[in-house]
């Protein structure tokens, strides 16, 4: 990667990934785009930024050509809970946007990355250590767009030779930009509320296991996969990756080690709970480890220590 275009760059992943890649490849070599512009935001201010709606194919192609990019990191999408509330719009953005981005990659000869998700699995997939290659019949619109996206990226590689790559991210936990309406968002909200009010009411039920990862590990994974030797990649577009699997009671117990008075209660949201119940408890990431050396640094304990320290500073909590 030398000159990189990022879509959805002001979201939870994009805002940190853009800064991370600018520190590696140079500020001017990472072109951030999003449908909205936030004046004063570091992603907008520290390098090139363009307003881009990914459903507008011509606008995307014009920007790619203007900057002569050789890589596209396509992040713009609606997340699971939002997609379930607006399924038609989710199809338009998640599939229409992906199709446009793949066409630009084909036309401009770009390497291409887009994330899939643990949402690409469904109730008939094996729940524990879900294999890399297995049954994928998700029942959510988000999951439908993710499986279709995996297939479309495979198609562009096989049919046109576009260098497409991708991972199935678990829930991502970070302190910089709030998450955009996913089912695993509780595992971010809980840290904010622990520091602000000392208690948290979880919308996900006790005992519901889901895979998670701390953002620094996710950023490293994207760069590592994009820089990996293509001859070693068998799967390319949908590598299972994970760092930890926990249920709400376990993250609460970990927070209690730092804030002993922290109190957890439950007010389960049936829509997000149903989505969580259809996802794996844990996934098997051995293909990513074997094919491109995927690795993580953070587990639940070290992530919690870091999240609380960083958020204390951000929220100015003593
Ligand atoms: P987010 O919701 O935080 O950010 C998405 C960004 O896309 C937003 O800044 C939004 O303004 C922008 N956007 C929305 N519609 C657009 C459009 N039409 N044109 C251009 N930009 C548009 O999402 P995120 O968490 O950063 O996720 C990025 C990608 O990673 C998505 O494909 C998502 O499915 C995937 N993913 C995320 C997670 C997670 O936990 N964050 C987990 C698995 C997969």
Image (cartoon, rainbow, N blue to C red):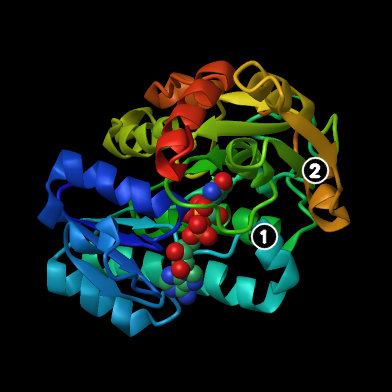
The CB of the residue at mark 1 lies under 8 Å from ligand 1: yes
**Could you tell me residue 176's position as x and y percent?**
42, 46
> Where 92 sits versus 250, above or below?
below
> For the residues marked 1 and 2, what is the alpha-carbon distance in whole angstroms?
18 Å
Residue at horizontal 14 percent and vertical 52 percent from the top: 27
Q: Position of residue 160 (x, y in %)?
A: 36, 60
For the point 73% across and 46% down, the residue is: 136
As rendered, which of 38 and 216 lies closer to the eye?
38
Find numbered disc 1 in the image and state the secondary structure of the residue it sits on. Answer: helix
Residue of label 1 = 142
Q: Residue 219 lies in what quarter of the image?
A: top left
- Kindly identify which residue carries mark 2: 204
Crowd class of label 1 (few under 14; some 14 to 19; many from 20; radius 10 Å): many
Residue drawn at point x = 48 percent, y = 45 percent: 237
Using residue 162 as the reference point, say whether residue 245 is left or right of it. right
Q: Measuring 83% from the left and 48% from the top, which residue is drawn there?
A: 273
Image spot of residue 82 (x, y percent): 67, 65
Q: Nearer the viewer, residue 297 or 314?
A: 314
């Amino acid at each position: 990667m030398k000159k990189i275009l990022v879509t959805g760059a002001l979201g939870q992943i994009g805002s940190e990934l853009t800064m991370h890649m600018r520190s590696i490849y140079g500020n001017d070599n990472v072109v951030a785009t999003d449908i909205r512009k936030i004046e004063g935001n570091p992603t907008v201010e520290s390098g090139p930024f363009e307003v881009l709606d990914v459903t507008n194919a011509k606008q995307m192609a014009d920007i790619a050509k203007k900057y002569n990019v050789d890589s596209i990191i396509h992040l713009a999408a609606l997340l699971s809970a939002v997609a379930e509330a607006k399924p038609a719009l989710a199809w338009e953005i998640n599939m229409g946007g992906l199709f446009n981005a793949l066409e630009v990659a084909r036309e401009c000869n770009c390497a291409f990355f887009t994330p899939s998700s643990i949402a690409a699995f469904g109730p008939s997939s094996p729940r524990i250590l879900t294999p890399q290659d297995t049954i994928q019949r998700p029942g959510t619109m988000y999951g439908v767009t993710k499986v279709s996206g995996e297939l479309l990226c495979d198609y562009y590689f096989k049919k046109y030779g576009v260098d497409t790559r991708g991972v199935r991210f678990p829930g991502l936990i970070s302190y910089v930009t709030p998450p955009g309406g996913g089912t695993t968002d509780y595992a971010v909200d809980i840290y904010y509320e622990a520091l602000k009010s000392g208690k948290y009411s979880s919308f996900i039920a006790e005992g519901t296991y889901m895979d998670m990862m701390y953002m620094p590990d996710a950023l490293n994974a994207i760069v590592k996969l994009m820089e990996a030797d293509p001859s070693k990649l068998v799967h390319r577009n949908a590598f299972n990756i994970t760092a930890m699997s926990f249920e709400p009671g376990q993250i609460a117990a970990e927070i209690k080690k730092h804030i002993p008075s922290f109190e957890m209660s439950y007010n389960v949201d049936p829509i997000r709970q149903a989505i969580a119940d259809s996802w794996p408890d844990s996934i098997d990431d051995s293909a990513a480890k074997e094919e491109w050396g995927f690795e993580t640094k953070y587990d639940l304990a070290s992530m919690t220590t870091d999240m609380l320290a960083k958020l204390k500073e951000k929220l100015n909590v003593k």
